[in-house]
Image (tube, grey):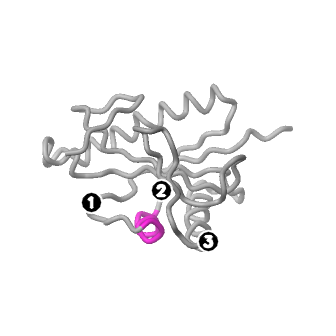
């Protein structure tokens, strides 16, 4: 069993959600896919091809119904075993509730930081798994959240 702690609530303290920032344009970070490691509060780069990043960004742009690519796409995944051992058939429902809790936390923080947040209602787990090499049945995407700088008018 893996133990972790996060700055948002999680049923049974399971903290099954993981965050993978997909960076398009962010000062101090190279374009790429990263895994956020909460224990050490750092980003670990994930090896992938440019066309895989392009595909994830295109999927997010299409889901948003806009032509503008986000600066950062946060892909939220679930490590299903962290929840399913305790909650069995209710596990996936609980995961989606946790995604909503995390979305609210990210909206509040992003707004306080004068960023432009946008939760997405669609994503492509197949494209994410292909880009990162995660096992689809152990960990795949369950939510996506775009972050960009506010437009200056």
Q: What's the mark number on residue 138?
A: 1
Asked if 10 appears above or below 120 in the picture, the reply is: above
Estimate the spatial distance between the alpha carbons at disc 1 and disc 3, rounded to whole Å: 25 Å
Q: Report helix, strand or loop for mark 1.
A: loop
Tell me where residue 100 sits by quadrant. Answer: top left
Mark earlier in primary sequence (1, 2): 2
Q: What's the mark number on residue 122?
A: 2
**Label 3 packing within 10 angstroms: few (<14), some (14-19), many (20+):** few
Residue 109 location, x and y as percent? 57, 29
Q: Report helix, strand or loop for mark 2.
A: loop
Q: Which stretch did the figure color magenta?
A: 124-132
Residue 151 location, x and y as percent? 78, 41
Q: Report helix, strand or loop for mark 3.
A: helix
Relative placement, left or right, of 52 versus 91 is right
Give the residue at x 45% y 47%.
19
Mark earlier in primary sequence (1, 3): 3
Q: Say whether residue 65 is magenta.
A: no
Asked if 44 appears above or below 57 in the picture, the reply is: above
Mark 3 highlights which residue? Answer: 50
């Amino acid at each position: 069993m893996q133990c972790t702690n996060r700055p948002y609530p999680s049923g049974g303290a399971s903290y099954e959600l993981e965050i993978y920032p997909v960076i398009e344009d962010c000062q101090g970070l190279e374009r790429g896919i990263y895994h956020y490691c909460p224990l050490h509060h750092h980003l670990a780069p994930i090896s992938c091809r440019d066309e895989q990043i392009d595909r994830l960004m295109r999927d997010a742009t299409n889901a948003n119904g806009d032509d503008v690519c986000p600066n950062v796409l946060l892909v939220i995944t679930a490590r299903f075993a962290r929840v399913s051992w305790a909650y069995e058939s209710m596990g996936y429902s609980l995961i989606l509730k946790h995604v909503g809790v995390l979305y609210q936390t990210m909206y509040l923080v992003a707004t306080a930081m004068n960023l432009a947040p946008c939760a997405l209602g669609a994503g492509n787990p197949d494209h994410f798994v292909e880009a990162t090499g995660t096992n689809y049945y152990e960990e795949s995407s369950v939510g996506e959240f775009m972050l960009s700088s506010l437009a200056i008018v």
